[in-house]
Image (spheres, rainbow, N blue to C red):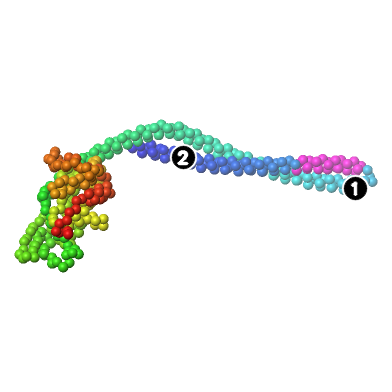
Amino acid sequence: GLLKERKAHFDEVSSQLEAEKKAHAKTKENVKKLMEFKTKAVAKIKHAARNISILKERDQKLQAMVKEANKKSKSNSEGEAAKAAMNAANAALEATSKAQQKTLQSVISSVSKRKTALSAAAASCKGVKQSIGAVKKMLGDLPSAVLDMEDILMKAFAARDKIMSGATNKLLKDYKREVKLRRKYFNELQELKGNIRVYCRVRPIIGRDKNSPVCVKFPNDKDDMSMTIRPAEGGSVSYEFEQIFRLDATQDQVFKEVSGLVTSVTDGYNVCIFAYGQTGSGKTYTMQGNKENPGIYYRAIQHLFDVCKERKNVNFDVQLSLLEIYNDNIKDLISPKEDSQPKLVPREGRNGIEVPGLTIRSISDIEDVRRAMALGIKHRSVGETKMNK
């Protein structure tokens, strides 16, 4: 309430200042007009003074003429001429007197108008002076009002910050509880799906298979995760899996099925995804893919970066290592010393199976992964089998 009262007082002072400013401007304009009027009046008075001076000179001359005429009127011979001259002098004197009266009336009228205008200006200036005094008084009171208002605002801001701080802490606490519950339920869901899951992906027909019949048959119900294999030698064998990806399955569909496991990594769970199958069955395409259609490797790590970015209140350090097990030997595929690698032997560690001496790189984006994978592919062992002759 006090804050509103101070604000109303401040607004009132501001409006009065604005009104006084307008009145001052108007008075200034009136004074300017008065000065112009004064200049014109002074000019008129000077002009009238000159006229009066001229009329006085003429009056003096006429009086001299009258005297001369009176003297001449005494002479009989010049009586008539003197009389005529006297009449002319009297007429001129009367005209001069009238002109003097007219000029004097004009000067008196001009001076009267000037006095009236000056009186109005004096009254206006007196009003302005009083208004300026009132404004000065208000301005004198303004600093204390501002200080009071500042104190009130500071207290209001402090109260608001306290309320917001409490609300923020409550929201943060609720958020952390919800995140904890979400992680719990999410990972319980992953466990319900099975800690160990076996998926099957059937490779579509490719160039070299064009003349071969499809030996795999699926049920009409797409939710039925079973399939039947009919070998060329006859008979049939049926299998069931947690998920079957048929011939038309895309890379994106395969990854969506395992993406939940990648999210569990950021919750502290150990996750392993690997492909198993004979040469030419599509393992490399499923896991690695190509630039236009990447496989699980790249999609999983990109998803991992996205989840880490969403969880801004946690700092993540993502590291990568790349190894190959070939003929029972472990090979470090991103080692800087390819030709002189020490023998790598796995062992049981605090966090599971570990390989001491394996190269580990910190990565910050998907391009780091691509460079490491390119180096690993270059160092892979390639051997000939009956399937890839």
User: In screen coordinates, is 232 left or right of 168?
Assistant: left
| Whole-percent x, y for residue 274 in the image | 15, 51
Q: Quadrant of residue 178?
A: top left
The residue located at (15%, 53%) in the rendering is: 275
The residue at which mark 2 appears reads as 16
Q: Where does the image place residue 147, in percent across and percent down from the top left?
A: 39, 32
Q: Position of residue 225 (x, y in %)?
A: 10, 59
Is 327 above or below relative to 282? above
In the rendered structure, which amino acid carries the disc numbered 2? Gln
* Residue 42 magenta-highlighted: no
The segment highlighted magenta reads: 51-74
Closest to the observer, 214 or 209: 209
Q: Dot 1 lies on which element?
A: helix
Seen in the image, is 369 located left or right of residue 52?
left
Location of the N terminus by quadrant is: top left
- Residue 81 is labelled as 1
Residue placed at 48% from the left, 33% from the top? 136
